Image (tube, rainbow, N blue to C red):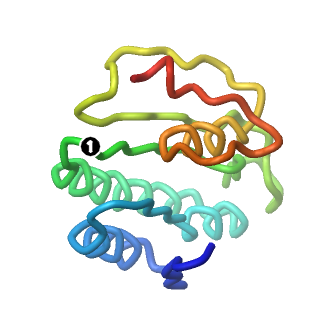
């Protein structure tokens, strides 16, 4: 992406800190992040580490929510399951969460089971008024 700032980081706490810093400096744009350590804990089959990381992420998301401005939209999702208790270190087949919030987003909307993770990308494109990707259906009209 032209003009994108990419900051490679693995630490869960550092990821949240960087998002909070970007929220202070980005006045109009898109911030995307990945919490990688939960993925690694799943591959390591370490349920305690996974649970601890989820608690850290939950606290961090709480801080992010507190900083949301009127026009901000927070989308939380995942790209795949990675159950640390399933008995193997590979990706698993759980459904991923899809949570959307913001001061101008309708509350209580059930987005249901989406046909594709691409729906998130299509929705983001719709929000920014840019060409939608080849795959995916925007759910922006359902939440705005």
Image coords of residue 126 (percent x, y) = 56, 38
Image coords of residue 76 (percent x, y) = 48, 45
Relative height, residue 105 to residue 13 (above, below): above
Residue at 54%, 64% in the rendered image: 34
Quadrant location, the C terminus: top left
Q: Quadrant of residue 70?
A: top left
Q: Which residue is mark 1?
A: 71
Residue at 34%, 69% in the rendered image: 19
The residue carrying pointer 1 sits among few (fewer than 14), some (14 to 19) or many (20 or more) residues within 10 Å by Cα, namely: few
Relative height, residue 94 to residue 125 (above, below): above
Q: Nearer the viewer, residue 67 or 139?
A: 139
Quadrant location, the N terminus: bottom right
Q: Nearer the viewer, residue 50 or 115?
A: 115
Q: Nearer the viewer, residue 129 or 85?
A: 129
Q: Dot 1 lies on which element?
A: loop
Does 66 sit left or right of 78 as displayed? left
Q: Nearer the viewer, residue 133 or 87?
A: 133
Residue at 70%, 52% in the rendered image: 82
Relative height, residue 41 to residue 110 (above, below): below
Image coords of residue 135 (percent x, y) = 81, 39
Relative height, residue 5 to residue 94 (above, below): below
Does 26 sit left or right of 89 as displayed? left
Residue at 37%, 79% in the rendered image: 14
What is the tally of numbered marks visible in this picture?
1
Image coords of residue 141 (percent x, y) = 50, 20
């Amino acid at each position: 992406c032209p003009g994108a700032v990419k900051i490679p980081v693995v630490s869960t706490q550092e990821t949240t800190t960087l998002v909070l810093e970007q929220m202070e400096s980005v006045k109009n744009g898109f911030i995307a992040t990945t919490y990688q350590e939960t993925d690694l804990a799943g591959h390591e089959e370490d349920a305690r580490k996974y649970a601890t990381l989820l608690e850290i992420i939950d606290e961090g998301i709480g801080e992010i929510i507190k900083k949301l401005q009127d026009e901000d939209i927070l989308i939380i999702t995942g790209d795949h399951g990675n159950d640390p208790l399933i008995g193997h270190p590979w990706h698993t087949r759980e459904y991923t969460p899809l949570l959307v919030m913001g001061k101008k987003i309708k509350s209580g909307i059930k987005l249901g089971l989406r046909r594709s993770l691409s729906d998130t990308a299509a929705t983001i494109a719709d929000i920014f008024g840019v060409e939608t990707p080849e795959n995916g259906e925007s759910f922006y009209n359902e939440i705005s």
